[in-house]
Image (cartoon, rainbow, N blue to C red):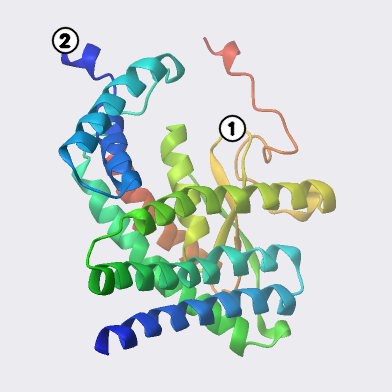
Amino acid sequence: MFKRIFPHPLLSLLLVIVWTMLVNKFTVGNLVLGVIIGFALPIMTAAYWPGRPEIKRPIKIVGYILIVLWDIVVANVQVALIILLKRHKNIHSHWIVVPLELTSPEAITVLAGTITMTPGTVTALLSADAGSLLVHCLHTDDPESVIEEIKSRYESRLKEIFA
Amino acid sequence: MIQDIIISVFIVLGGVFGLVGSFGLVKLQDAMQRLHAPTKATTLGLGGVLIGSMIYFALVDGHFSFHELLITLFLFITAPITAHFMAQTYLRMHRDEADLPPSGRPVGWSIYQDPPDFSADD
């Protein structure tokens, strides 16, 4: 019954929050309208979500977001220092290949996005069977440790969120 | 007075990071390296300005503004996708699969190869 009315509870919650933030004024009327949108949109779009990802531990998302935000700040400073202080020939760029243990498309998308937003790495390609990511690293002398960090810092946490 | 200083610090910090990101576009030589500058330094550049704006509305205008958080949310969703598309286009136009490291999988990278036929397994 609950699943029929709210096919996607997290999406409903997100829509209510985003709607309240969009109108930028917290009133009961806006909240009611937000709830109506959060109720109607998932039902209308449920047909376009076949094989929706199962999120096992929504609470862990908060911790993940905080870690990524902190890493983005660090990444910005690191990249800025590389751009400002290093001569071009001293910047050692590498291609690195990250083997994936994640299987759900949504989890891989989040991981690829996280890699792009954090320290000196950009996701370039996915292998044809979605088993590994090609990542471009702006400056590193030890590509193995970058792979290790991506796997331990982000992928292991995503594995807990998307079971 | 103090709130003016705090707001100014965030806006100037944002401006500095935006400038460094743009400078990176000029300085870095390789197209893949240049891709790093706008996806990183500019994120904090915009972030600084948005935090300054939020503090302004909270302290000076006296009400809390959520629009900055939404801009951050939408930026974080779109920036990696833009970078990903630019990287794919660049690799497709200017590089060969032979230039890239092997994927470590039985099949190669997705823009050069079709996905394997999964229907055979069913």
Instruction: Name the residue nearer the viewer: B102 or B68.
Output: B68
Q: Which residue lies under the disc numbered 1?
A: A129
User: To which quarter of the image does residue A89 belong?
Assistant: bottom right
Report whether mark 1 lies on the same chain as mark 2: yes
List x then y, in percent, for residue A130: 55, 36
Q: What is the chain letter for disc 1?
A: A
The amino acid on which the numbered mark 2 sits, given as a three-letter code, is: Met
Q: Quadrant of the N terminus of chain B?
A: bottom left
The image shows residue A60 at horizontal and vertical percentages of: 22, 47
**Alpha carbon distance from label 1 to label 2:** 37 Å
Q: SS class of the residue under badge 1? A: loop
Q: The residue marked by circle 2 belongs to what chain?
A: A
Secondary structure under the numbered disc 2 in the rendered image: loop
Residue B49, picture quadrant: bottom left
Residue at (39, 79) in percent of width and height: B10
Residue beneath label 2, please? A1
Horizontal side of A152 relative to B103 (left or right) equals: left
Q: Quadrant of residue B104?
A: top right
Mark closer to the chain start, 1 or 2: 2
Q: Say above or below: A149 vs A38.
A: below
Please determine whether, in this image, residue A57 is positioned above or below residue B46.
above
Residue A108 percent coordinates (x, y): 46, 41
Q: In the figure, A52 relative to A101: above or below?
A: above
Three-letter code, disc 1? Asp
Classify 10 Å Cα crowding around label 1: few (below 14), some (14-19), many (20 and above). Answer: some
Residue plotted at (49% across, 72% down): B45
